[in-house]
């Protein structure tokens, strides 16, 4: 069943890719609008936009989804809920397509909430306590972004419509900027909402390849691309820039010390998301979009290769228990090497064309040199942890546990080979198409900065993890600090715990002191007064008169 769905998605991917090429070549966009008369004073219409950005993006989503479906035919074989898994993946792709093509903020919210709901169902797929905890962190964090999107809809209602274009040039609603920003950074796991992405690795590896490479985490970046006109506000751009720089530094250092195989890949995803948002905040819209597409290709392939390893190791995800894959697994080791080099920006692979252009454009813009130096340092760290990952998996001595049973399967290899082909050729093909150049400008020594960064990162990885590995483990506090993502996970759960404790305190106060000093106290007071009133009315007037006389008599005496 998954195999048929995978082939169908690959066919749709080819169809959308041809449509996107046609639109880009002709410079055309297609709008589909359906007017609905539900409201009297508000023009409500269902509108979809089919531009080359959205069509290409959905084409890549379907390419990765099809490869993941074919891969899952063997990976999920024997699972009793395999049909449920396939339906959830299809629902996820449909929700992402609705989000991408919607030009009406109301339907953007429908696709956005669909992504959050289905991703929660996928994270808790294994239905164990660890999955439930990770799913709860994921869904609670993403609900913050949903609230931001709802508040932005309220701002659009005050304009009388829900179309993006109605806000162009109308900056009298600064609250909208921050609501859209909150929605984007929660979905893309930027600081201070970075803890949910490594926690979501409790999902099956095929889900991580789809959800955490090209769909869920990139939804926030694509939302900012749609609202790119908001970056005309300088303060807003600077805020986004500083948040993404902090996230890039956090994820780059943490990936250098993480020992969980899937979390290393998740942290590398987090760092590349930060690179996209940095490019967007610097006004590089097309380069941000280009890097988003290229990253989806090689990162999905990296997740699939890691999934084969975890599958063979009986769900063991410790880096130190792997090694020697270059001897026993040629296809997976080739995929790991290609994806690692593409992530580092090795020349003529998918990541090189986007990362090199972003670095050059930022260096030659009228921007503080601190940002360029910062990016160079973080790119060195990226090359370092990419080498570290490949060193542990490919070239270190074999450390498989005795219970491991490692073998490759045809369907898994097909999914990896499809994505590896696009990871090699996709950058050049899409780059030549999106950025046509008639003349080649050679910048001299600056042109070799990318190679210099790659060389420094590889050298740093060799020095630390090949020759100096025993000395690294002596710095336990540093390893704990970076391995736990600057303890940001603690603060996320700490704030959730304190908010829940506060709500519990409010409930107990409302049931005890609130009742005694509020409604219940007034109720019992009125009841006591009514009892006295009843006693007073039951007494005869003569008895009352005699009592008054007796009192007066005793007072006179």
Image (cartoon, rainbow, N blue to C red):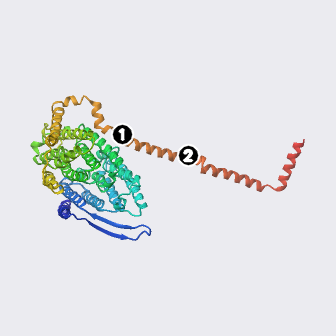
Name the foreground residue: 129 vs 26.
26
Mark 2 or mark 1, earlier in chain: 1
Residue depth check, mark 2 versus mark 1: number of the one nearer the observer: 1
Name the foreground residue: 168 vs 22.
168
Quadrant occupied by the N terminus: bottom left
Q: Secondary structure at mark 1?
A: helix
Residue 487 in the image: above or below residue 288: above
Which residue is disc 1 drawn over? 490
Name the foreground residue: 133 vs 492.
492
Name the foreground residue: 434 vs 68.
434
Q: Secondary structure at mark 2?
A: loop
**Image x and y of residue 154, in percent:** 42, 58
**Image x and y of residue 253, in percent:** 26, 38
Which residue is disc 2 drawn over? 512
Mark 2 closeness class: few <14, some 14–19, many ≥20 residues within 10 Å: few
**Image x and y of residue 41, in percent:** 44, 68
Q: Residue furthest right?
A: 557
């Amino acid at each position: 069943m998954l195999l048929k769905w995978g082939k169908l998605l690959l066919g749709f991917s080819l169809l959308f890719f041809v449509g996107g090429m046609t639109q880009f070549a002709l410079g055309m966009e297609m709008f589909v609008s359906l007017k609905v008369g539900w409201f009297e004073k508000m023009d409500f219409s269902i509108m979809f936009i089919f531009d080359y950005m959205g069509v290409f993006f959905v084409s890549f989503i379907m390419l990765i989804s099809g490869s993941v479906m074919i891969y899952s035919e063997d990976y999920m074989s024997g699972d009793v809920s395999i049909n449920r898994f396939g339906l959830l993946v299809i629902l996820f792709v449909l929700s992402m397509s609705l989000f991408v093509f919607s030009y009406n903020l109301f339907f953007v919210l429908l696709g956005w909430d669909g992504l959050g709901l289905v991703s929660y169902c996928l994270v808790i797929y294994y239905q164990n306590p660890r999955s439930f905890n990770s799913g709860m962190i994921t869904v609670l964090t993403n609900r913050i972004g949903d609230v931001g999107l709802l508040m932005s809809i309220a701002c659009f209602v005050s304009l009388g419509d829900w179309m993006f274009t109605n806000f162009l040039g109308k900056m009298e609603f600064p609250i909208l900027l921050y609501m859209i920003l909150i929605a984007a950074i929660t979905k893309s796991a930027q600081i201070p909402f970075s803890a949910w992405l490594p926690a979501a690795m409790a999902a099956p590896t095929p889900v991580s390849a789809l959800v955490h490479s090209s769909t869920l985490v990139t939804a926030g970046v694509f939302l900012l691309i749609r609202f790119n006109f908001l970056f005309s506000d300088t303060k807003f751009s600077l805020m986004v820039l500083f948040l993404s720089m902090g996230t890039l530094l956090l994820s780059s250092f943490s990936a250098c010390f993480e020992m969980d195989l899937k979390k290393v890949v998740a942290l590398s995803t987090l760092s590349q998301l930060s690179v996209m948002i940095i490019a967007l905040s610097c006004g590089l819209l097309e380069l941000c979009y280009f890097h988003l597409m290229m990253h989806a290709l090689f990162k999905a392939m990296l997740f699939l290769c890691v999934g084969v390893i975890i599958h063979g190791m009986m769900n063991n995800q410790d880096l130190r228990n792997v090694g020697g894959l270059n001897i026993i697994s040629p296809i997976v080791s080739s995929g790991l090497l290609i994806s690692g080099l593409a992530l580092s920006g090795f020349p003529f692979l998918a990541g090189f064309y986007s990362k090199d252009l972003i670095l050059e454009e930022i260096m030659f813009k009228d921007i503080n040199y601190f940002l360029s130096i910062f990016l160079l340092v973080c790119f060195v760290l990226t090359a370092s942890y990419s080498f570290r990952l490949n060193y542990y998996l490919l070239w270190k001595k074999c450390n498989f546990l005795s219970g491991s049973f490692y073998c490759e399967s045809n369907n898994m290899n097909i999914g990896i080979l499809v994505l590896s082909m696009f990871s090699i050729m996709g950058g050049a093909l899409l780059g030549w198409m999106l950025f046509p150049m008639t003349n080649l400008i050679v910048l001299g020594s600056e042109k070799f900065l990318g190679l210099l960064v790659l060389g420094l990162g590889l050298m740093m990885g060799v020095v630390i993890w090949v020759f100096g590995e025993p000395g690294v483990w002596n710095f336990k506090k540093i390893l704990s600090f970076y391995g736990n993502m600057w303890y940001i996970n603690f603060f996320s759960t700490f704030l959730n715990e304190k908010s829940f404790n506060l709500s519990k305190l409010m409930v107990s106060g409302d049931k005890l002191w609130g009742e005694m000093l509020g409604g219940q106290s007034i109720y019992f007071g009125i009841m006591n007064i009514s009892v006295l009133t009843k006693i007073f009315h039951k007494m005869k007037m003569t008895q009352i008169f005699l009592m008054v006389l007796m009192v007066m008599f005793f007072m006179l005496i």
